[in-house]
Image (cartoon, grey):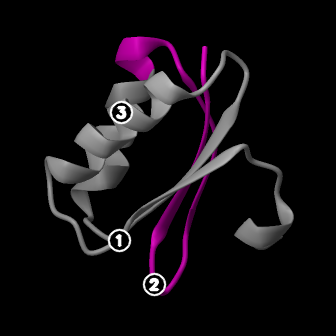
Amino acid sequence: MSSEQKQYDKKLDAKGLMCPEPIMLLHKSMRELDSGDILLMEATDPSSERDVKKFCQFLSHELIDFETTDSALIFYIKKN
C-alpha cells in the first residue's frame, strides 16, 4: 500500500535534512498533534531510522508502520 493510501492527520517532509533536524522537526510536529493522531514523516537521512525508533520508544509514541522506498524512509507515528 503506498503512503498516499494510508490514513494520517499530518505530514512532515524532512527529506534532504540531516541529523538532528529531522528529529527536531518531528518533536515539534508531535507537540502540535492531539493524542491518537497519526503523523506521516518522510526522511532521507539514513540515521533517521534509528533516531525515530528511539524517539518513539523514549516518548511512548507508537511507530505503527515503517517502510523504505527508493526515495525516502517513511514513518507512521501515532501520538500517545
Q: Position of residue 27 (x, y in %)?
A: 35, 31
Q: Position of residue 36 (x, y in %)?
A: 73, 21
Kindly identify which numbered label has been placed on residue 59.
none
Q: Residue at x 45, y 23 (%)?
A: 31
Q: CA distance from mark 1 to mark 2?
A: 9 Å
Mark 2: few/some/many CA within 10 Å (<14, 14-19, 20+) = few
Amino acid at pointer 2: Ser
Which secondary structure, mark 2? loop
Instruction: Report if residue 70 lies within the magenta region.
Output: yes
Above or below residue 8? Residue 71 is: below
Kindly identify which numbered label has been placed on residue 71.
2
Q: CA distance from mark 2 to mark 3?
A: 24 Å
Q: Residue at x 72, y 43 (%)?
A: 9
Report the magenta residues as a range. Answer: 57-80
Reading the image, the residue beneath label 3 is: 28
Q: Quadrant of the C terminus?
A: top right
Q: Residue at x 36, y 51 (%)?
A: 49
Q: Residue at x 85, y 67 (%)?
A: 5
Mark 3: few/some/many CA within 10 Å (<14, 14-19, 20+) = few
Amino acid at pointer 1: Lys
Q: Compare marks 1 and 3 and give the one earlier in the sequence.
A: 1
Is mark 1 in CB contact (under 8 Å) with mark 2?
A: yes
Which secondary structure, mark 1? loop
Give the quadrant of residue 17. bottom left
Q: Residue furthest bottom?
A: 70
Reading the image, the residue beneath label 1 is: 15
Q: Position of residue 10 (x, y in %)?
A: 63, 47
Give the quadrant of residue 25. top left
